[in-house]
Image: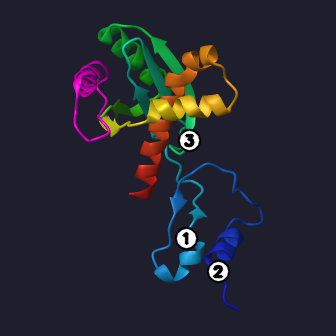
Amino acid sequence: QVKSPVNLFFEKMSGFFRLARPGPVCYPKSRKNAPYRRLFCPGKETTMRIMAIDYGDAHTGIAVSDPTGFLAGFTTVIDAYRPDIVAERIALLAREHGAERLVLGHPINMDGTRGPRSEKAQAMRQLLEETTGLPVVLWDERRTTVDAHQILFYAGKNAKKRKKVVDAVAASLILEGYLTFKKNH
């Protein structure tokens, strides 16, 4: 009888199942095992935390991934107008949560052109790299705030409650897009 990689994996686990254990996904080297490609590898856990930032004039949304780098684990909003204060608070949060990479929302116009908001994001990128010492990735954030408003609206939040958390939800959408891209590439 031919055993699948999944059966072999569970036999090696000596009788206990650990599917809920967080960790990266391992892929067999051969393509013939394509139906069984998603196998968990205990003991090879990653600790790459990524922080996504939805930078705004008055409110900046923050979302931090969990230690595995698969999900958003923490969200908050920084209420500040001055970019230097925002950068300092982001640096504190990055140290507190152990972020190793920052993903900054880059507002590109729907037609693909770059406007004044894009220039502000690029200036913030430079400021964050100097303040935190971490690599900063610019990530296309078209429609994230609109999508965040729609998510909160359909969740039953009124306009006043939406205003308080919409930036954090937008940062979560940026983080989700980046993490999905990372998993697929």
Q: Label 2, on which residue?
A: 4
The mark found on residue 148 in the picture is: none
Q: In this rendering, does residue 64 appear at all?
A: no
Q: Nearer the viewer, mark 3 or mark 2?
A: 3
Residue 124 picture location, percent across and down: 27, 21
Q: Quadrant of residue 2?
A: bottom right
Secondary element under disc 1, as helix, strand or loop, is: loop
Q: Label 1, on which residue?
A: 37
Which amino acid type is shown beneath numbered disc 2? Ser
Q: State which tag comes first along the sequence, 3 or 1.
A: 1
Q: Tell me what residue is drawn at x 57 percent, y 33 percent.
A: 150
Which amino acid type is shown beneath numbered disc 3? Leu
Q: Label 3, on which residue?
A: 71
| Rendered position, 147 above or below 182 | above
Secondary element under disc 3, as helix, strand or loop, is: loop
Q: Tell me what residue is drawn at x 63 percent, y 29 percent.
A: 153
